[in-house]
Amino acid sequence: MTTIRPFYLDCDTGIDDALALAYLLATPTVELLGIGTVSGNVAAATGAANTRDLLQLAGTPGIPVAIGAHDFLARPFDGGAPHVHGPNGIGGITLSTADHTPHSETAAELLIRLAYENPGTLRILAIGPLTNIAHALRLEPRLPALIAEITIMGGAALVPGNITPVAEANIGNDPEAAREVLAAPWNITLVPLDVTMANVLEEEHRRELLAADTPLARTLGEMLGHYYRFYEGIFGRACSAMHDPLAAAIAVEAVALRTAPVIHVEVDAGHGPGRGQTICDLRGQHLGYPEQPGAHCRVVLELTEDFAAHLTNTIIGRTPQNQESRLQAAHA
Ligand code: BDR
Ligand code: CA
């Protein structure tokens, strides 16, 4: 029997956030109950507008989208990453505008309500700065006991950062929030740059999206044109990392993990060159990572197989079940 899992998504939409959203919507075991936006790639309000427009394009405009924190815990939002995600966060693509009437709750309030309505089963996927989640913890310190698991795209364990030599953007934008969220007593899965930079979407995958049947998949293919130009400066060819969609696939347990130790992780929220670093205690690596008493953060370092084809097949709708039913229909 297939278990349907309720999810709350916290995002800063964002091209790779858009891929993660499309992936969740295409995954039959996911029930996406609500989405909160946070400033990061774009301002929280812009991220909410992008998210609503994408939901409309996907034909699922009814999922609530709550605007979350505009500013980080210890500093104001400073304009985001237009050089990575384009001036509007979605590669400069104009989508037909959905109803943008604001949701009555903040992102933190929406998350807390959904947690109480789904005690012990709600999963959080956080793919932006952790400001909303930190606000939710401050509003409701019992939140961790209500949540089955939180999966976070963020950090860098053994590889360089992407906004400073050591800090990854989601953690580095709001280290105070990340520190609180990683210290809270819940089951955390951290999906850092170690694994998201090692799994790359190539031009052939973008072409498949561009040729797909659905407007959402084709639009994602167009957005990726912008994202690939940024990553060309990093990888030396037109391609992109898969930060947020990989975190989504790990949250829904659709990819097998080769190395994912449960270890102590701390965030440097100081003001020196280490600010925003995720300090991962990987000292057990030569012994196969023996148990660390009290540790509750699983850090994904390596997958067993390539992820790109799974991502594009899921978004395009070529899941094994769909393929089978298409074949059956074709032979009926
Ligand atoms: C993370 O930062 C954002 O730019 C992306 O959307 C992703 O969540 C990668 O460091
Ligand atoms: Ca993101």
Image (tube, grey):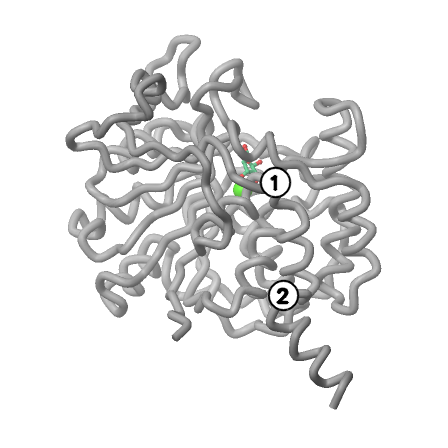
Report the mark closest to the observer, 1 or 2. Answer: 2
Q: Is mark 2 within 8 Å of ligand 2?
A: no
- Residue at coordinates 70% horizontally, 41% vertically from top-left? 201
- Up the image or down, 13 lies above or below 233; here it is below
- The amino acid at mark 1 is Met
On screen, residue 146 versus residue 43, left or right, reads left
- Residue at coordinates 19% horizontally, 41% vertically from top-left? 185
Q: Is residue 269 visible?
A: no
Residue 89: where, in percent of width, then height? 65, 44
- Up the image or down, 66 lies above or below 125; here it is below
Mark 1 = which residue? 242
Q: Quadrant of residue 57?
A: bottom right
Number of numbered discs visible in the structure rendering: 2
- Residue at coordinates 37% horizontally, 27% vertically from top-left? 175
Badge 2: how crowded within 10 Å, few (<14), some, or many (20+)? Answer: some
Q: Nearest the camera: 234 or 114?
A: 234
Mark 2 = which residue? 319
- The amino acid at mark 2 is Thr
Q: Nearest the camera: 220 or 85?
A: 220
Cα–Cα gap, marks 1 and 2: 19 Å
